[in-house]
Structures are given as structure tokens and as C-alpha cells.
Amino acid sequence: MRAVIADDERLMREQLQQALAQVWPDLQIVAEAVNGQAALAEIERCRPDVAFLDIRMPGMSGMEVAAALDGRCQVVFVTAYDQFAIEAFERDAVDYLLKPVSLERLVLTRQRLEQRQGRGSDVAVLQRLAAELAAAARPGYLRWLQASAGNSLRLISTEEVYSIEADEKYTVVRSRQGESLLRLPLKQLLEQLDPEVFWQIHRSTLVRVDAIDRVERADDGRLHVVLKVDGRRLEVSRSYAHRFRKM
């Protein structure tokens, strides 16, 4: 199958394309568009099987693009807003995805699209898709993070991360790749990381255990962990000092 991605935010286009590459490596992304008019033009030019459309874009909205297509290709809406879902399905959308899109949710979208393409009667395909969906939905911990660094999007293996710290607006990830910003709140991120690998040492700080070089006690009795990579000292709050009592 061939696809067009339309979103006015470049990082969102890259994020979706990278996620699709993981759950659907055979899908060909034939074009990208930064607004509604460009999306319609690319769809006319490339004749894709599916268009992944953001709803709020400059010029024509994703809804207006879908209306103009009049069924010439399948449509999946990808948006940060949930209030347009009813209208989306009235436009005969195959799916309605909320940002940030998870991999397991994209596997379900793939299943719906392939079934609409006439592959739903293929038992082998359905069995394979069911297995993929089950694997994606299996409980587990994050193995990589999608973080922004300047104008680019980074995929960072959690094995490379040595500290994660909450800032005023972002979550700062420090890894072998340098410093990157994550939009996911620290509290939500903590629930998705292996607690045996990442320890919370402060309300705003997570540390990878094997990145700790040593633990020091200051004159005022407060504990600090010292990182192997850069020698930074991170404060351990009293609420989490019990982790180091036996050290």
C-alpha cells in the first residue's frame, strides 16, 4: 500500500513516519504535505491508497481535504483533538488517532486498512495481524524514547539514557546522544520504565541505576548520586533516600 502524510508540524510527520516504519515496513510513504492544499495536490499526483491527515492545518482542514477526495483513497485522521471523531467517521474515515500515536494503536489501524483493501478474507493475513497486535499490546516497558533535539526528532534507546529530569515545560533526557527534550510528563514516563532499571531519586529526577558511579553524603546529611558519564551530582530527596541506606 502507498500513503501520504499531511501535518503542518514537521516533527509530527517524522514521528508518524518512524512509527509506521516499525509496525508496517511494507507501507510506502510516497509524499508528505504541510497543509491541506498541498495534501490534496499530493494525493491527486501520487494516487495513494491511504492518506494520514491532521485535522487542523493551514488553509484547508483535514476534514475539508477528506470531503474533496470523495472516497478516492482511504483516510485516517491523526489529531490532538478528540471532538471531531463523530464528523470523521461521517466522512467514512477508516480510523481516528489521537496524538501521540502508540505503536499498538497503529497496528490496529493497519489491520483496518488492509481489511478494507480486500485482504480481510485472507486467513493467514488476519492471523499474522492478530499476532502482531497481541505482541504490541503485551505489557512491557519502553525500549526507546522519541525526543526532540533542536529541529530534529531523536529515537533514543533507553539503554543509552542515564538521567531524566523534569523541567518547567519539558522533560529533559540526557543520554549518550546528548541532551534532548521529551513532551511526556515525568510521572507518565515513570509508569512506562522498568523500575529495576530506572530509580526515582527526587520528585523531578530519574536515574538509570547502572549510570551511578557513587553516592555521597553532604555536610547537611543530604545524599547525592554522582554519574559515571559526566560526573554530575544529582540530589536524592529524603523520600527516596531509603534506596541507598544499605550502600
Image (spheres, grey):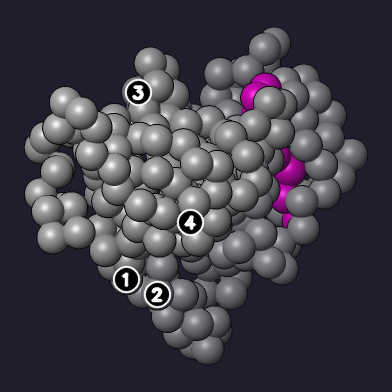
Q: Which residue is mark 1?
A: 138
Of label 2 and label 4, which has the lower sequence position? 2
Q: State yes or no: discs 3 and 4 in contact (Cβ < 8 Å).
A: no
Q: Say which of 6 and 122 sits in front.
A: 6
Tell me which amino acid carries mark 2.
Ala
Q: Under tag 2, what secondary structure?
A: helix
Mark number, residue 135: 2
Lateral position of residue 81 relative to residue 60, left or right: left
Q: State yes or no: discs 2 and 1 in contact (Cβ < 8 Å).
A: yes
The local crowd at label 2, few if under 14, some if 14 to 19, many if 20 or more residues have their Cα within 10 Å, is: few
Lateral position of residue 219 relative to residue 27, left or right: left
Q: Which residue is mark 4?
A: 158
Q: Which residue is mark 3?
A: 83
Q: Position of residue 191 (x, y in %)?
A: 25, 49
Look at the picture and state if 193 lies above or below 165. below
Q: Nearest to the eye among marks 3 and 4: give it.
A: 4
Q: Say whether residue 114 is magenta.
A: no
Q: Nearest to the eye among marks 1 and 4: give it.
A: 4
Q: Say which of 180 and 84 sits in front.
A: 180
Q: Nearest to the eye among marks 2 and 4: give it.
A: 4
